Image: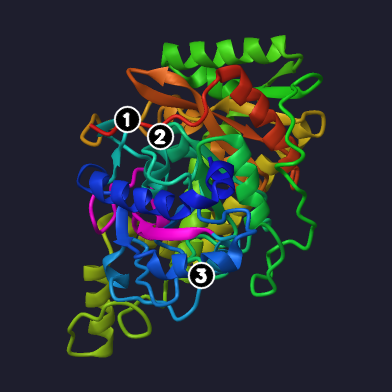
Amino acid sequence: MIENIRNNRTSENQAVQEAVNKAQAVQSKLNAMVTFIDPSEQLNHINEHEDGLMAGVPIVLKDNVSTKGIRTTASSKILDNYVPVYNAHIVDLLEKAGAICIGKSSMDELAMGGTNLTAATGAVANPWDTTRISGGSSGGSAVLVASGVVPFAIGSDTGDSVRKPAAYCGVVGVKPTYGRISRYGVIPYSSSLDHVGYFTRNVLDACIGLEVLAGRDDRDMTSSTKDVPPYSKLLNDSLKGRKIGIIRNVVDSIQNETNVKLFNELIDKMKNEGAEIIDVHFDNKLMRAILPTYYMIANCEATANHSNLDGIRFGVQADGDSSENVMINSRTQGFGIQVRKRFITGSYGLFVENQEKLFRKAQRVRRLIVNMMDNELVNLDCLIAPASSTIAPKIIGEKIDELAEEYLVAENHMVMGNFSGYPSMTLPMGFEQGCPLGVNITCKAFDEVTMFNIASGIEKCTGLKDSIAEVK
C-alpha cells in the first residue's frame, strides 16, 4: 500500500485528499481524530522529498507526538492549550521521507489505559463493530488504519498499547526494540517502558515504516547506535527451520474456543511450512505478577514524569487563591478519574517508606520475568501466542474479573515485550462474529529482521493482509 502510493507519482495529491475526506466522513462514527491538519502546505513541498520511502503517503500521528505549531493534547483536558514549539524526532523523519500528516489521533488520556474510552474527546469506536472498543492507548491510530483512512499511523506502546488495538482492529501493530526509535518529543508515560510503535495493514509496509523511523538521535540518550538494516529488502516469508515457542500459559488460560481453534489452525499451517513448534511453559506465578508489576513501575514513573502538569509550569490553569490551590484545582479538573487513580498508586509507591517494598520489588520481579524470557529465547527464533483472549469487548459491557487467570495472563502477557524491550508485533489471525482476532510474536533484542520474516510467513499462512473495515 505504501509502495503503491509512492510509486504512482500522479496519485499523491489524490491519495492525501481521499484520506482527508474519509477521515472526516467516519469521524462522527469512530471519533478517532482529535485534530485535523490541513495538508496543503506539506503538499507544496512534496517534490523536495520525492525520493523518500513514504513520498505522498498520508499518515496520522498519535496525539502525544509533539508537532511544532499544532496542538498536542495527549487526549487530556490539562493539555488542551498545549502547542509545542518543536517537532518530535519522528515527525522530522517522516517529513523527510515525504509522508503527509493529516491529523492527530485520539488516545487514552496521557496513554494511561487499554480501551481508548478515557480520551477527553470521548470514546473511540471499533470500525468492525462500532459498539465495541478499539483498544488502547493508541486506539485512534489503529482505527484510522483499519478503516482505510491512512495506510500508516504512529502509536506508542508502554504495555501493549499498539499491539492490543492492532489485534482488536485487525491490523499490523509493531513495537520495535527499546531504543530502536527515538522518543524525543513524545509525551512520556513510563520512561523505562515507553516505545514508539506504529500501525500498517501489511508486513511489507511495517518494514518500510521501521526503515524510516529507526536510528540514533543524540537528543534521546536511550536511542541505539546500531545500524538500521534494509528490512523491506531482507523480507522472506519462509518458515522452514524456524523455531517457534508457543507460550502455553496464555493458550491454556483462554476460554474462547474460536480463538484457540484459529490459533491451533495457524500453528498447523506453520508446521506445514517447515516451522519447528515448541511448547513453552513459563512460571505461572510470574505470569500472574505481570500486571501488578507493570502497574507499580509504570505509575511510579508516570507520577514523576507528569509532576510538571500543575497549571503553573504546564497545563490549563484553574482558579485558586494560592499557588497550592491553583495546582490542586488544575490537576483535579484537568485529569480524568483513571489518571488520578494511577497517580495515587504511583505516589504511594514513591513514598520513601514504600519504595523498597513496592517500587524496587516490582523492578526485581520485572528482572525475573525478563530472565524467564531469556532462558527460552536463547534456543528460539520467537515466542508466539494469541494477542488477546477475545475479540474487542463492548464499549458498554460486562465487568471484567481482573483477578481471573484469563485476564491476568492472556490479556497482559504482551507487557513482557515492554519489560524486556524486545521487538514484538501483532498481526491478524482470523475473525469471530465479524471482528478480528490477532496473534503476537516476540523476538530477541534488535532482531527485527527475524520478526518481520516470521510475521511475513504468518501473513502467508492466514492470507490476511490489507483488510479494510467497512464502517457502518
Between the residue at mark 2 and the residue at mark 1, the CA separation in whole angstroms equals 7 Å
Q: Position of residue 406 (x, y in %)?
A: 44, 25
Q: Which quarter of the image is occupied by the C terminus?
A: top left
Q: Are marks 3 and 1 in contact (CB under 8 Å)?
A: no
Name the disc covering residue 45, or none. 3
Q: Which residue is under mark 2?
A: 169
Per the image, label 3 sits on a secondary structure element best described as loop
Q: Residues within 10 Å of mark 2 (few under 14, many from 20)?
A: many
Lower position in the chain sequence, tag 2 or tag 1: 1
**Residue 157 appears in view:** no
Q: Which residue is under mark 1?
A: 128
Q: Position of residue 103 (x, y in %)?
A: 37, 59
225 on left or right of 115: right
In this view of the protein, which residue sits in the foreground, 266 or 1? 1
**Residue 31 appears in view:** yes
Mark in the foreground, 3 or 1? 3
> What span is in magenta?
99-122
235 on left or right of 345: right
Majority secondary structure in the magenta region: loop
Residue that extends furthest to the front in the rendered view of this protein: 10
Lower position in the chain sequence, tag 3 or tag 2: 3
In this view of the protein, which residue sits in the foreground, 20 or 87? 20
In this view of the protein, which residue sits in the foreground, 453 or 64? 453
Image height of 344 relative to 203, above or below: below
Q: Residues within 10 Å of mark 1 (few under 14, many from 20)?
A: many
Kindly identify the amino acid type of the residue bearing the numbered disc 3: His
